Amino acid sequence: NAGVTQTPKFQVLKTGQSMTLQCAQDMNHEYMSWYRQDPGMGLRLIHYSVGAGITDQGEVPNGYNVSRSTTEDFPLRLLSAAPSQTSVYFCASSRRGDQPQHFGDGTRLSIL
Amino acid sequence: QQQVKQSPQSLIVQKGGISIINCAYENTAFDYFPWYQQFPGKGPALLIAIRPDVSEKKEGRFTISFNKSAKQFSLHIMDSQPGDSATYFCAASPSSISGNEKLTFGTGTRLTIIP
């Protein structure tokens, strides 16, 4: 049972480049979310989805897009990377928003 | 506006001692309070959680104490071991019929257990 799988594990981008962070879960969870983790700031919610075809903004959505075409996948797109987006990104899934969230191991992203 | 305040930022405890991490919240609608444990290079993992119908919940060496009137909750790790060295996050969310409420995380506590 793979749980939540994130790819890639590491990525270096140049300012202005775009990329997609992949997230897949095999637990048939309806609720999926993306967080960024920065030193001293904890985990901040970027976007979340309560089911296929439904997404909403979290605390820090600017510069990011998401879509949810299937229950399993929830990709995060950086439209035009900026150095301020250098962070560790975590994807999580759960049955409901108020139930334990299962996190992936993160994508470490550096924007030069 | 930070809705969940966590302290201390870092904590060093001797092996066998008690580690205590505190969180305070502002939103009175919060009624689900989980703690997550994160090891380097890994994602956070649920450690223990409490809802406000009880004032304390214990699972092995880990205990959550909850004070609804003070809007505070804390994690106690008894007989702390070197393997407990990790970053700990408290979190909180409201509940609803839909179950689609969002978690708000504290800023984390880096715990180091020394021999």
Image (cartoon, rainbow, N blue to C red):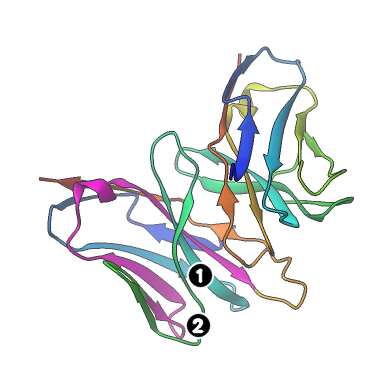
Q: Type of residue at label 1?
A: Phe
Residue at the left extreme? B115
The front one of A94 and B32 is: A94
Give the left or right position of residue B84, taking residue A73 as reference.
left
- Tell me the SS state at disc 2: loop
- Which quadrant, please, contains the C terminus of chain B? top left
Residue at the front extreme? A1
Q: In which chain is the residue bearing label 2? A: B
Residue B20 lies, in percent from the top left, at: 27, 63
Q: In which chain is the residue bearing label 1? A: B
Residue visible at 19% across and 52% down in the picture:
B81
From where the camera sits, is residue A63 visible? no
**Badge 2 or badge 1: first in the primary sequence:** 1
- Tell me the SS state at disc 1: strand
Residue A65, located in which quarter of the rendered image? Answer: top right
From where the camera sits, is residue B9 visible? yes
Residue visible at 57% across and 52% down in the picture:
A102
Residue visible at 67% across and 12% down in the picture:
A14
Q: Name the residue under label 1.
A: B33
Whether B114 is among the magenta residues is no
Q: Name the residue under label 2.
A: B52
The front one of A62 and A75 is: A75
Residue B93 lies, in percent from the top left, at: 61, 68
Residue visible at 20% across and 57% down in the picture:
B80
Within 10 Å of the Cα at label 2, are there few (<14), some (14-19), or many (20+) other Cα atoms?
some
Give the left or right position of residue A81, taking residue A100 as reference.
right
Q: Give the range drawn in magenta.
A: B65-94
Within 10 Å of the Cα at label 1, are there few (<14), some (14-19), or many (20+) other Cα atoms?
many
Residue A5 lies, in percent from the top left, at: 62, 37
Residue B110 lies, in percent from the top left, at: 33, 46
Q: Are marks 2 and 1 in contact (CB under 8 Å)?
A: yes
